[in-house]
Image (cartoon, rainbow, N blue to C red):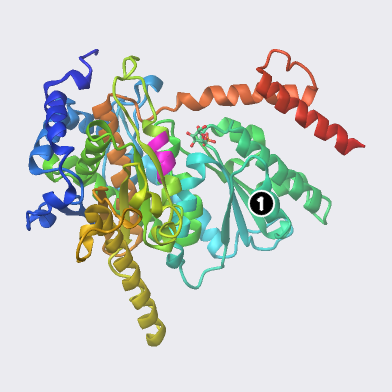
Amino acid sequence: MSHAPIDQSAAWQALAEHAAAMRGTHLRELFADADRGPAFMLRAAGLTLDLSKQRWSDETLARLLELAREARLPEAIRALLTGERVNVSENRPALHSALRLPPDASLVVEGQDLVPGVHATLARMADMVARFHAGQWRGATGRPIRDVVNLGVGGSDLGPLMVTHALADYRPADVHRVDVHFASTMDGSQLVAYLSRFNPETTLFVISSKSFTTIDTLSNARTARDWLVARLDGQEGVDEALVMRQHFIGVSAKPEKMSDWGIAEANQLEFWEWVGGRYSLWGGIGLPIALVVGMAHFRELLAGAHAMDEHFATAPLAENMPVLLALAGIWNVNFLDIRAHSILPYDGRLEYFAAYLEQLEMESNGKSATHDGREVGYSTCPVLWGQLGPNAQHAFYQLLHQGTQPVVCDFIAPLRRYDDVEDSATREHLKAQHRLTLANCFAQSRLLMLGDDAIDEEGPRPGHKRYRGNQPSTTLLLDRLTPATLGALIALYEHKVFVQATIWDINPFDQWGVELGKQIAGETERILASHGGHERMDASTRALVEAVWQAEAAGDD
Ligand code: F6P
């Protein structure tokens, strides 16, 4: 149904007027109100969200909530969670939240209860994980598998990579150790580094690809298959079929394509078209996670995400964590013109969290056409990047403090850490390091907010030492980093993305923008390989192609 663009609504116009007044207000003035901190703080599912360092007021928030209602957000949330076809351009639901429903739940979508299928896949995963952890998943020569390499890219890589790294401490004791690795790049450089180190007899590959057509993944998979077959086929009692059966698992929404490629049916984990690639770590794509942390912890991850789903579904808009996080983003992008967003975890275990969010947010909301295909008249997703906060302090924080760009930051940290370190002296040292890390996290957000006023000094600081301040930020504290709180954190951002997409009237669940690039890459590859046909290309690309041919010719000499 076509409706007036959101930026023509009364709520948007009121916000634009309000923003004109707020733009001149420095964060330090907002903090003249001594109660401001607690008033913008929220707790849910083991997370504490502090939005007080955003450049907004009670009035701003009230007006943003009005905008959310204008965009029919409550109806949209209901539509998402009950399985309506919210992915309009691909005509299907987006039901990642169904992957974390408990086994006794029921979600009937278009006449079918999805929960039994979800739990059947989890049961298959559990069987596989149990075999690995018992040392019973053996390679073709009979030796237990020791190294598992996930071959996937985008959503079939970043989620499992991020979570396995974050939860590495949760590896179950007393199981056969299986190390999990990730190779995504199409140039084969990551894969080749593993192949030179690993023993083919004890190495298994998980080919993770929702579509099972992604060239990056399939070219790595072909190299892996050739490597295994060349080394194992012909050993006593080993043939190619046995190598395929013992050394490959496939995870995809396309079982027939997995079979065509040679993945044994018993080694296939299927998921559904209604799970978006970047939202898929909660099912079969999460197999590497379950291999590292065990199935019990994997289920805790799902339970944490489900707790956030429940909160999202039931909390009033004004107390709803994903909604408020999203509204802060809308306010920054659309009304304060802040279009750069940095993700800064203060915990080394969250090393890949920013990379994960870059895909989640920018592939979801990097759109400029509304649901009915009109060009939007306002900004959508900001440019998002990040890295571990303590390291970024020694890299790009200079720009945050004294550059010319307004940037909003998300600071993320666990409140408690290292309680379980056995040796008491080491525990105390590590706890002191954790305290130091939190001190840095809080100091940076305070300095970014207040500028020079963060320290008591007589008189103004000279120009090159001046801190302007007024950079807004969000602080997210996890009680501890556990499977459950990590699940809740990821679900929080997933839902934030959906809320923003709803207000911007865009579809966060498609990614047509990456398709044309794949097509042109295919044509370019054919030209490079055939040494002809580049005449119709632009002058720059033509010269680049010729440089490759010249390099190849020189290499042949
Ligand atoms: O090209 C983008 C994309 O389709 C992402 O959306 C997806 O996560 C990634 O490629 C990998 O896709 P697949 O899981 O189908 O291999």
In the image, what residue occupies the spot 72% across and 43% down?
Answer: 223
Depth check: give the residue in front, 412 or 115: 412
40 or 312: which is nearer to us?
A: 40
Within 8 Å: ligand 1 and the Cβ of disc 1? no
- Relative side of 520 to 271, left or right: right
* Mark 1: amino acid: Gln
In this rendering, would 270 be left or right of 362? right
Count of numbered circles on the image:
1
In terms of image quadrants, where is residue 113? top left
Q: Is residue 293 left or right of residue 532?
A: left
**Which residue is depicted at the point 70% across and 40% down?**
222
Is residue 359 magenta-colored? Answer: yes
Residue 187: where, in percent of width, then height? 67, 41
> What residue would you read off at disc 1?
246
Q: Is residue 392 above or below residue 310?
A: below
Identify the image quadrant of residue 388. Answer: bottom left
* Residue 151 image point, x, y percent: 59, 45
Residue 313 seen: yes
| Residue beneath the point at 7% across and 54% down | 33
Location of residue 34 in the rendering, given as x and y in whole percent from the top left corner: 7, 58
Q: Is residue 229 above or below residue 517?
A: below
Magenta: main secondary structure:
helix
Q: Residues within 10 Å of mark 1 (few under 14, many from 20)?
A: many
The quadrant of the picture occupied by the C terminus is top right
In this picture, which residue range is highlighted in magenta? 357-362
Image coordinates for residue 372, horizontal then vertical, percent = 31, 15
The residue depicted at 20 percent of the width and 50 percent of the height is: 51
User: Which quarter of the picture shows residue 176?
Assistant: bottom right
